[in-house]
Amino acid sequence: MKEGTETLASLGEFRLIRDFFAPLQTGEAPGVVLGIGDDGAVLTVPRTQQMVTTVDSLVEGIHFDAASDPFLLGQKALLVNLSDIAAMGGKPCWYFLSLALPPETRIAWIAEFVRGLREAGERHGVTVVGGNTTGSRGGIGIHVTLCGLVSQDRALTRSGSIPGDRILVSGTIGDAALALAVRQGRLTLPEGPDLAYLTDRLDRPEPRLALGLGFSDAAAVHALIDVSDGLVADLGHLCAAAGVGATIQAENIPFSPVARRLLERDPGLFAAMVTGGEDYELLCTAPAGALDLLAALARDAGVTLTEIGVMTEATEIEVTRAGKTLVFERGGWSHF
Ligand code: ADP
Ligand code: MG
């Protein structure tokens, strides 16, 4: 098969599924009684567990454009969903792939997209078990539904924070926002290892699955969310879900060495870094007495976990920095 310029129009739906999507199904995940090829998948959920499910869409013109690398898109379509399963304390298993494709989509594009899905799927032990394929008169639409397993009644939710809870975040914040700023021409950074690091954080986020599972197994946190909308907005989601407020210290927010260097050069980048989104880190709250346990879980998971503040009885989020207080409402940048 020539994959260079050939398009879907010459391939057809049946061969597309047979040659590209069906081979994505692997024996990686347990519990698949019936996968691709029938009217529905049959999956076994062990008696002591529950299924946790999430879906995310990547739409051409909104999340990516014609020039975007299809390999990275395939990876990211899974990675953003894996992060949601991590944020529920689940173990990811099975996914459904629903695609809307214009007839002029190149087969080479599909092949690269599928390669990205396969790479991310194999790395995290998940397999496709079904999907849907339809034409599109607009751009490409990619919709991945991911199912995972969580121990009975151990799913970790956004609600449950109480005033006095410590707020902790994994990894580092703001790298993806900086990469996006460079890509959109709002920030200049020469080609080199720093830009490569930031770009990788945007294109290939690492879902914090081991940490989420550890939190669930140990019932160690009161509330958990993944940072996809931005640190402040997602902290706002935790606050709203529990009817509480929060105070965080800007000095404590974990920034990567690259981000810290850029921030020193231009302190004005701070707002974009804490509101920018796409960090895919885990943000949790827990009682002070659980901090040692949390540190041990983070060590076991091989990620850093940094305490950045405390939940309060207020109704808003305060970010204090060098004696000044910035007040955010609902994730928006509001006033000093
Ligand atoms: P139906 O008409 O019963 O919905 P389809 O003909 O749409 O079935 O799909 C045939 C089989 O191929 C189904 O098992 C479906 O889950 C699978 N499938 C279709 N599209 C995709 C896709 N993009 N990725 C993975 N599996 C797919
Ligand atoms: Mg059918």
Image (spheres, grey):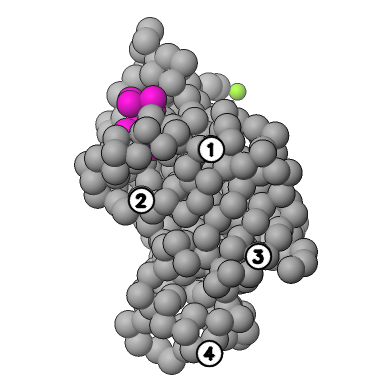
Q: Residue 325 got which mark?
A: 3
Q: Main secondary structure of the magenta part?
A: helix
Q: Which residues are magenta?
A: 212-219
Q: Residue 164 got which mark?
A: 1
In x, y percent, where is residue 316? 71, 49
Residue type, label 2: Leu
Q: Look at 74% across and 68% down and name the residue there.
A: 336
Residues 229 and 203: in front is: 229
Q: What is the CA distance from the residue labelled 3 to the residue labelled 2?
A: 24 Å
Secondary structure beneath label 3? strand
The residue at label 2 has a CB less than 8 Å from ligand 1: no
Image quadrant, ligand 2: top right
Q: Residue 188 got which mark?
A: 4
Q: Is 163 on the left-hand or right-hand side of 171?
A: right
Q: What is the CA distance from the residue labelled 4 to the residue labelled 2?
A: 30 Å
Mark 4: give few (<14), some (14-19) or many (20+) Cα within 10 Å. few
Q: Are marks 3 and 4 in contact (CB under 8 Å)?
A: no
Residue type, label 4: Thr
Mark 1: give few (<14), some (14-19) or many (20+) Cα within 10 Å. some
Count all numbered tags in the image, as a single digit: 4
Q: Is residue 46 visible?
A: yes
Q: Residue 305 got which mark?
A: 2
Q: What is the CA distance from the residue labelled 1 to the residue labelled 3?
A: 19 Å
Q: What is the CA distance from the residue labelled 2 to the residue labelled 1?
A: 18 Å
Residue type, label 1: Gly
